[in-house]
Structures are given as C-alpha cells and as structure tokens.
C-alpha cells in the first residue's frame, strides 16, 4: 500500500461566479493515496482541504475510487453572502447568550413538611397528610415548587450542526445530567430541548441554537411523617403510601404514612454531547 498523502488534482478546478464577477463557489478534486476505504479517505482529506482563497469548506465527498488504495475526493467551497468566509473570525462564532428565571413549577403534594398547628388540641394527627376527607382519602394540594429555569443561546458553525447532532439533541431531551453541569450536581438539571435557526440556506452557515434547562435541587436526610428518607434526586418522583392508624386521642382512625417511594422517572444523559461544555 502506498504511503498516505493528499494532492490536488490540478486542472480540474471549477469556479462559479455571480453577475458582479465575484467567485461564489469553488469545486476542487483531490487525490488521496494510501487508504483502504471511503471513511479513511475523507478523514485524511479534511485537514488538507479546510479553506481555499478565503472561502470555507462547505462539503466534501468521495466521487471515485481510482484503485485499491487511491480515491478522488471533491471539496466544495462557498463564500458567504457578504463575501466573507463562513468560518472567518468575525467575533460572532461561538457567541453565547444566557438567561434564567425562577418562576418555578407546580407539584401536587399529599404530604406537608410539617403540621404547624391543629385545632382543637385533641384533633386527630395525620402526620402531615394533607386534606384527609371523611372517607379517609388523602386529597393533597397543588403548590409551587422551587425550579430554576435557564436558557443558553450559542452560535455554532454549520459544520457542527449535522443531522447526527440534531438527533443527539432530540435523544437528550427529557434526560437529567449524569454528571455535574453548570455548577449543579448530577440529577438536578433536566434538559427540556433545543431550537435552532439560521439565516442562510448554505450548509456552512452558522446556527443559533437555544438550549432550555430546568433545575430542581437534590434533597438528602429528610422525613416524611416519621419515615426517614436518605436521599431524593431533584427530578425523582416521591410518593407516599398511607394506612389507617389509631389516632393519639384513641377516638379516631387516621391516615398516616407507612411507606415512601422515590422513583426515577427521567433517564440520565451525557450533557457533554450537547457540545456546549459542562
């Protein structure tokens, strides 16, 4: 097998110009020697063909297999509508915008943190069960729960926002962070999804992508009624099972917690695959 090298196929370059005589697109074929398959040919060619004449690489593809270890690869370069290379350093690439709010969310609770008072003094003690009716049903109440919502808008180059990357964002939607993220512990951050826009049809044009997150704090070492709970990750779901017990006044039957369950309802995700750092 020949040694690996990449050479331009001189004499086969094609250029496209607009009505003003500006070069808008250039196609250049390259020969890649010493590789056994298409993937290796593309991988070898990419560092060699990144830019030409101030124009950035728009696409690269294998167009012909010359022999067992020689390939012809075509690289297409495009100029931005303003004449600048899409990958030129304009100061906008990888720009980021951050926003947050603490509007919180709503949660239905059947169990209070504590009972601050009951009147008269000999009223039945339900050990924190909320709104127990005459049939013994624990009806609970809707409350605002502590949730920090935040968004990040990042400008990413068109070459980064591939179909595969979009599928990754979709797969990570509705997952919680497997490891620390933005200063929060694992299990506290829920990825709510992303939306992207770009202002050009060119494949190399930059995307503005907004990532949405919500944070619910982890809890450890707390009680539900008389039951000690060791930990609950922020987006776990906690529910309580109740049973009839004789009240302390010996006059009533009351509902009291007899079991607490902490359920994982969101899968874990590797937020490193979002491509915006930790």
Image: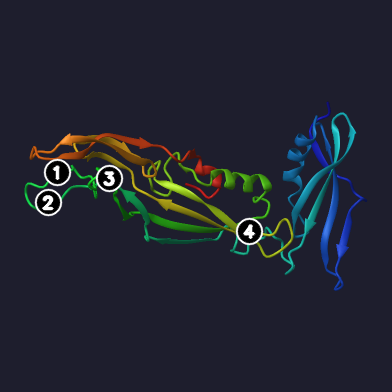
> Mark 4 or 3, which is nearer the eye?
3
**Position of residue 205 measured from the top left corner of the image (x, y, whole percent):** 69, 59
Residues marked 2 and 4 touching at CB (< 8 Å):
no
Tell me which label, 4 or 3, sits earlier in the chain: 3
Q: What secondary structure is found at the residue carrying circle 2?
A: loop
Instruction: Find out whether the residues at labels 2 and 1 contact each other: C-beta distance under 8 Å.
Output: yes
Among the two numbered marks 2 and 1 on one chain, the one whose residue lies closer to the N terminus:
2
Mark 4 or 1, which is nearer the eye? 1
How far is the residue under mark 4 from the one under mark 3?
Answer: 50 Å
Dots 4, 3 in contact, CB < 8 A: no
Task: Report crowding for label 1: few under 14, some 14 to 19, many 20 or more residues within 10 A (C-alpha).
Answer: many
Tag 4–tag 1 contact (CB < 8 Å): no
User: Which residue carries the number 3 mark?
Assistant: 138
Residue 1's place in the image compared with 186, above or below, is: above
159 or 48: nearer the eye? 159
For marks 2 and 3, give the CA distance.
17 Å
């Amino acid at each position: 097998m020949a040694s690996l090298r990449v050479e331009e196929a001189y004499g086969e370059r094609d250029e496209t110009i607009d009505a003003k005589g500006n070069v808008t697109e250039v196609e250049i074929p390259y020969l890649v020697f010493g590789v056994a398959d298409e993937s290796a040919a593309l991988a070898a060619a990419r560092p060699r063909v990144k830019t030409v004449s101030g124009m950035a690489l728009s696409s690269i593809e294998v167009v012909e297999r010359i022999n067992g270890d020689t390939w012809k690869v075509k690289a297409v370069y495009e100029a931005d509508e303003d004449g600048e290379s899409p990958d030129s350093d304009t100061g906008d690439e990888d720009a980021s915008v951050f926003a947050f709010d603490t509007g919180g969310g709503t949660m239905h609770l059947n169990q209070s943190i504590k009972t601050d008072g009951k009147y008269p003094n000999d009223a039945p003690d339900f050990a924190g069960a909320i709104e127990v009716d005459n049939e013994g049903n624990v009806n609970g109440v809707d409350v605002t729960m502590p949730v920090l919502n935040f968004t990040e808008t990042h400008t990413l180059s068109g070459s980064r926002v591939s179909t595969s990357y979009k599928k990754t964002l979709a797969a990570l939607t509705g997952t919680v962070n497997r490891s620390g993220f933005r200063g929060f512990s694992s299990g506290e951050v829920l990825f709510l999804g992303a939306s992207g826009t770009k202002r050009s049809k060119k494949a190399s044009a930059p995307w503005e992508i907004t990532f949405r997150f919500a944070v619910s704090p982890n809890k450890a070492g707390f009680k539900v009624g008389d039951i000690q709970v060791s930990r609950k990750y922020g987006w776990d779901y906690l529910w309580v099972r109740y049973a009839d017990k004789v009240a302390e006044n010996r006059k009533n039957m009351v509902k009291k917690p007899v079991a607490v369950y902490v359920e994982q309802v969101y899968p874990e995700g590797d937020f490193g695959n979002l491509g915006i750092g930790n």
